[in-house]
Amino acid sequence: MEVRPKMMTVFGFGLVLGFIVLTFVPAGYGQVPIPTRQDGFWYEERVAGVDSVVIEAFFDPVCPDSRDSWPPLKQALSNYGSRVSLVVHPFALPYHDNAFVCSRALHVVNGLNSSATFQLLESFFHHQEGFYGKATFNLSRASVVDKVAKFAAKTVGGSSYTQLKSGFTDTKTDHATRISFKYGCVKGVYGTPFFFVNGFPLPDDGSTLDYKKWKSIIDPLLFA
Ligand SMILES: *[C@@H]1O[C@H](CO)[C@@H](O)[C@H](O)[C@H]1NC(C)=O
Ligand SMILES: *[C@@H]1O[C@H](CO)[C@@H](O)[C@H](O)[C@H]1NC(C)=O
């Protein structure tokens, strides 16, 4: 007899709490804020036109599979010229220790000299072993950032090391790198490399897309 009113009280309290949560937590909670501009780096500044075939690539700069997929894609891009555009989004995989800081370096450099972004991406691909988790296991976070900044400065020349280094304490570049990651998440990216062509995902069959395969994907779109 005495249990019932207590249960009702608990139940009633739950209802009130539920009401408060539903009413006062903003409706957009959990959504990604829309960035002021689209994410990504356009290869050779070849921004897509209405007739272009658009390839979106999600690359982790310290991922060996991303590295291996780049030469055939680059070859395809040079073959098709202005009819095919590529936009690259850095996508930092959580199981690559330095992926975020290396992705951030791309945003830092892009902010200083956008034409040097792909140069840095290629340099990461060529020398990525130095940034693997194993190679930097005993380094502090500060040393890793320093190493990345020095590496970037050496690669892109023009921009000075100090400028690059201060790019890593600019919250804007942190934000931009997060947006790149979140954009991938929104599109369902779960590994790298990950490609979309005209907005549609390419099936991941585990093998690297070679030049022939890129041709077999793009030719029908251009010459159908
Ligand atoms: C890290 O430091 C430990 C202890 O000094 C050493 O045994 C190990 O070889 C170091 N690892 C690397 C990758 O330098
Ligand atoms: C920007 O980068 C490009 C490509 O690396 C380079 O040729 C150019 O000199 C750089 N510009 C400046 C102002 O550093």
Image (spheres, grey):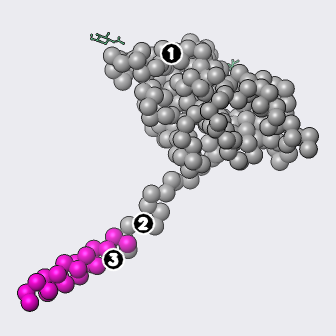
Q: Please provide percent x and percent y for residue 17.
A: 27, 74
Q: Which mark is residue 129?
A: 1
The answer to if 165 sits in the magenta stretch is: no
Residue occupying image coordinates x 44% and y 61%: 29
**Which span of residues is magenta-colored?**
1-22
Q: Please provide percent x and percent y for residue 174.
A: 47, 37
SS of the residue at dot 2?
loop
The residue that mark 2 highlights is 26
Sequence-wise, which precedes: disc 3 or disc 1? 3
Amino acid carrying label 2: it is: Pro
Residue occupying image coordinates x 47% and y 19%: 131
The residue that mark 3 highlights is 19
- Would you say 96 lies left or right of 3 here? right
SS of the residue at dot 1?
helix
Residue occupying image coordinates x 33% and y 16%: 138
Q: Quadrant of ligand 2?
A: top right
